[in-house]
Amino acid sequence: MSARRTIRRAVTVSGVGLHLGRPCTLTFAPASSGAGIRFRRTDLAGAPETPASVSVAIAAERRTQLGTGEGALHTVEHVLAAVAGLGLDDLVIEMDAAEPPIMDGSAEPFRQALLGAEPVEHAGDAPVLRLREAVRVVDGESVYVAHPAEALELEVAIDFPHPVIGAQRGHWTVSPEVFSRELAPARTFGMLSWVEELRGKGLIQGASAENTIVLDERAVVGTTLRWPDEFVRHKAMDVVGDLALAGMRVAARITATKPSHRGTVTL
């Protein structure tokens, strides 16, 4: 068993949300042992809380959403990836808007903020979700096969009809060190050809070349890739974040082909 972990002190980051395009100040704060990961909307009357749990996850396009209506939380996957990637179990995440800041499009700014808040062990043992047998999930083009394992092992494959992306595959045994070095800095990405349609749906209102890898028909526009396969690394980082909705640490060997937020929540 591993000891539960929280942070020693609160830390705050601010920015604009990716899809809603609204400013948000987010504060990570310590929580008592057994509290789990909870979001608190400080902009709403009574500061309602929502657990980071699959029980309140909603099928939403191109993001992970918790809850519905005025109190809904949108695009929480990068925040949760940083929390889960560092092996934190008990936190309050305060937000004064419905969507966390996108920062640079990766989990790295959240990871750095949490490291600055000094992760610490506290009372209790961290629960681990383990599989007794293999599980297979198909959700549209997304296919997942999960097998029993002693740690979280991810093999992720994507295939985009673009000359810079194409078919990419990666394999990682996820630990705080591996997550920090190999996955956290990988940024979200999108095609210029998607912009009109998605903005017509009220999405990517806060997207820019500063927080998204933008691609035209042939190349990356306005930035340099952090790795040639940054795209599949970002998809793997998203999987880590969405698996946090299990409400405990996950030990499984998971092969995810063309993963999506909805598919991982279904898994």
Image (tube, rainbow, N blue to C red):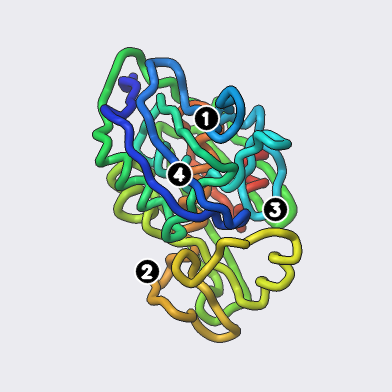
Residue type of the residue flagged with mark 4: Thr
Name the residue nearer the viewer: 241 or 113.
113
Q: CA distance from mark 1 to mark 3?
A: 23 Å
Residue type of the residue flagged with mark 3: Glu
Q: Are marks 2 and 4 in contact (CB under 8 Å)?
A: no
Q: Is residue 246 visible?
A: no
Q: Residues within 10 Å of mark 1 (few under 14, many from 20)?
A: many
Residue type of the residue flagged with mark 2: Trp
Say which label, 1 or 3, has the lower sequence index: 1
Tell me residue 195's x, y (percent): 66, 72
Name the residue nearer the viewer: 174 or 73.
73
Is label 3 in a helix, a strand or a loop?
loop
Please report the residue visible at 28 percent of the width from the left and 45 percent of the height from the top.
Answer: 177
The mark closer to the camera, 1 or 4, is 4
Q: Based on the displayed image, in which of its 4 quarters is residue 26 positioned?
A: top left
Disc ID at residue 61: 3
Q: CA distance from mark 2 to mark 3?
A: 26 Å
